[in-house]
Amino acid sequence: MSVLASASPTFPVLPALILTPLFGALLVVLGPRRRPELLKLTAVLATVATGALSLWVLLAFDAGGEGFQFASRHAWIGELGISWLFGVDGISLFLIVLTGILFPIAILATDPGHDSRAYYAWMLVLEGGVMGVFASLDLVMFFLCFEIVLVPMYFLIGRWGHGNRTYAATKFFLYTMAGSALMLVGIVSLAFLHADATGGALTFDLVAIAEAQSIATETARWLFLAFALAFAVKVPIFPLHTWLPDAHTEAPTAGSVILAGVLLKLGTYGFLRFGLYLFPEATHHFAPVFLVLGVVGIVYGAVVATMQKDLKRLVAYSSVAHLGFIILGTFALNTEGIEGGLLQMVNHGISTGALFLLVGMIYERRRTRQIDELGGLQKSAPLLAGVFMVVMLSSIGLPGLNGFVGEFLVLVGTFNAHRWYAVVAAGGVVLAALYLLWAYQRVFHGPAEGDNADMPDLCLREGLVLAPLLALIVVLGVYPKPVIERMEPAVDALVEHIERHVDGFEEPTSRMGIDISPDGPLDGPADSEEGH
């Protein structure tokens, strides 16, 4: 992988993606407290502008390029080799676009209820931090953005959440901060060890350090674990997941949408961008551990979700299962698995984000999320029931909707490399259908009694907010080729990087004879001996 200077536009679009929401946050802070409608308008305009920039990056992105595009480098602390270094490739592209789409939807969908100025300011700071994580190619810049997002999410949960929100916010902050502290030690150690080994100047440039591979094997394994712990907490991977259900349950609706849709992806993206790329040998060495944890997360998340009485908590535990699929695909260490995991990051953000929006809409109408207090909602709100069913089926992985493609690629990639892990994970798909269909049946079918019989249906504003997510669910399920063909060069380059630096490692040839390359058939034998 290399930064493609030729792909860098005159306009610094990646810094603009980070600074636009931060500038919007400043405008919100300076805005009139007594005019909440102006504060919301400012926040919406800032997030829409950021979303437009992310779509511009998507349209201008060179689908055939395997390196980093739209590169931007500016020295920050030259003596320490720290730079404002940004770039985007097929691995980070769609996570940036997902962030640009979800934030305006989350802000438009709900109102904070109180202290609008602080709420919208924190939401915009959160967006700027997330964009920084996905665009940063300097380890220090990545760490700063990785940590910055904790602060706004802590306040969003703690001040605008429900029930036991203070406990949930504190638990979220302490868990993720503790994991990140060890990563900071790993980043500093990695940079100094790289400088000593190469005899060069101190640098935190991701590409320079990763391509040099100058760290001794045993040392690299310890450093990988320092990074992996921070990412595992952020994902979160079983058994480090206990903060997630509490945070989701007590967070406001917009906070849950962003937490599920974007923030959890900081951990899975970190494994791809920094774990596999910086430490290929260590990744290969520890892959069986993460494969086991991924499978356990799939089964555990599904079983515990089935037992939940709170609809929002059920959706939260479903995220544990879906994130287990992403970890499984990532550590299959082949093209199908990594592409499937990456695609599932995007699909999970869309589907689960939409589920949390719908659960929030039900709560606003009924003031309860207890499944046994709901029932028969299909009679009073048929449109809401229909939209919920489509989103639920996409989360299950119904063919023709977005969730199927990612899960299929993950299972194919895992089957090629580790057959029995894929067999067990496939059982998780069945369990997902069980708990989601059972929850849908209890909430929307049966007799409608009391307030359930008079619950209002979706209004026009809510329908317009959900429309982009529904469109993406269908489009990505029917025609995922444009997404896959932009991911594939970067994923292939990452797999080749692992092959070069791991003795005896070779990407498994597909035992199913399927060519998933953009130009190859999806249903016939592959002509290439590489067997993507």
Image (spheres, grey):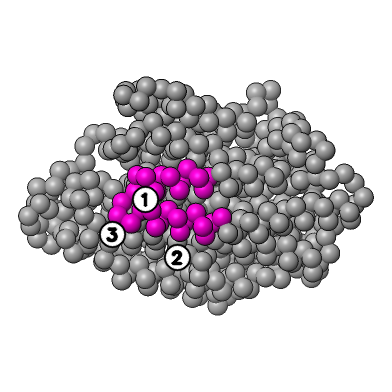
Q: Residues within 10 Å of mark 3 (few under 14, many from 20)?
A: many
The residue that disc 3 covers is: 311
The residue that disc 1 covers is: 251
Q: Which residues are magenta?
A: 149-177
User: Is residue 82 among what the camera can see?
Assistant: yes
Residue that extends furthest to the bottom in the rendered view of this protein: 420
Q: Amino acid at mark 3?
A: Leu
Q: Amino acid at mark 2?
A: Thr
- Vertical position of residue 152 compared to residue 182: above or below: above
Depth check: give the residue in front, 26 or 111.
26
> Which badge, 2 or 3, is on the more N-terminal residue?
2
Q: Position of residue 361 (x, y in %)?
A: 25, 46
Q: Residues within 10 Å of mark 1 (few under 14, many from 20)?
A: many
Q: Residue at x 84, y 64 (%)?
A: 216
Q: Position of residue 34 (x, y in %)?
A: 31, 24
Q: Residue at x 76, y 36 (%)?
A: 77
Asked whether, in this view, residue 398 is left or right of residue 339, the answer is left
User: Is residue 325 among what the camera can see?
Assistant: no
